[in-house]
Image: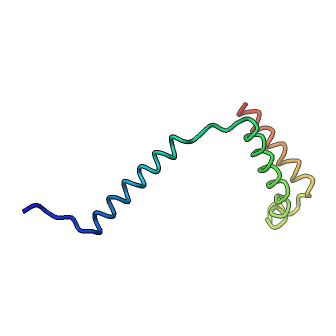
């Protein structure tokens, strides 16, 4: 007599197949970022980092002695150095 799969097991297999198919569809539908999107993304991240950077640094015992201007300038130098390497 052949083994009969339980309803739960069948549902799990169907769900797993659906998830696999959904993942494949997602991979196929990805499109490359445009230059405009890349630039805007970098600007948003830079703004986020710059505005919150000093607030986070002043709470850190090692960095608390650094001024806001110095922290932001250092961040911009690191960012520019990283972008030059990736270009």
**Image coordinates for residue 80, horizontal then vertical, percent:** 81, 39
Q: Is residue 32 above or below residue 48?
A: above
Task: Give the colour scheme of this rendering.
Answer: rainbow
**Picture quadrant of residue 78:** top right
Task: Say which quarter of the image contains residue 66.
Answer: bottom right
Residue in the picture at 32% in, 59% down: 13
Q: Nearer the viewer, residue 55 or 48?
A: 48
Left or right of 2 on screen, residue 68: right
The residue sitting at 17% across, 64% down in the picture is 4
Can you give x and y, in whole percent of width and height, for residue 69 in the image?
93, 53
| Image location of residue 26, percent across then percent down | 51, 46
Residue furthest top as drawn: 87
Q: Is 8 located above or below residue 33 in the figure?
A: below
Task: Choose between 31 and 48: the one closer to the eye.
Answer: 31
Q: How many marks?
A: 0
Query: In which quadrant is the N terminus drawn?
Result: bottom left
Residue at far left of view: 1
From the viewer's perspective, tell me whether residue 15 is left or right of residue 37.
left
Q: Measuring 90% from the left and 52% from the top, which residue is drawn there?
A: 70
| Residue at position x 27%, y 68% in the image | 7
Q: Quadrant of residue 35?
A: top right
């Amino acid at each position: 007599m052949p083994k009969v799969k339980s309803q739960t097991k069948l549902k799990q297999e169907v769900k797993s197949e659906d998830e696999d198919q959904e993942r494949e569809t997602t991979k196929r539908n990805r499109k490359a970022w445009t230059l405009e999107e890349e630039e805007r993304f970098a600007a948003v991240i830079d703004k986020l980092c710059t505005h919150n950077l000093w607030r986070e640094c002043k709470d850190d015992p090692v960095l608390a002695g650094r001024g806001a201007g110095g922290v932001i300038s250092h961040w911009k130098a690191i960012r520019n150095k990283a972008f030059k390497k990736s270009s």
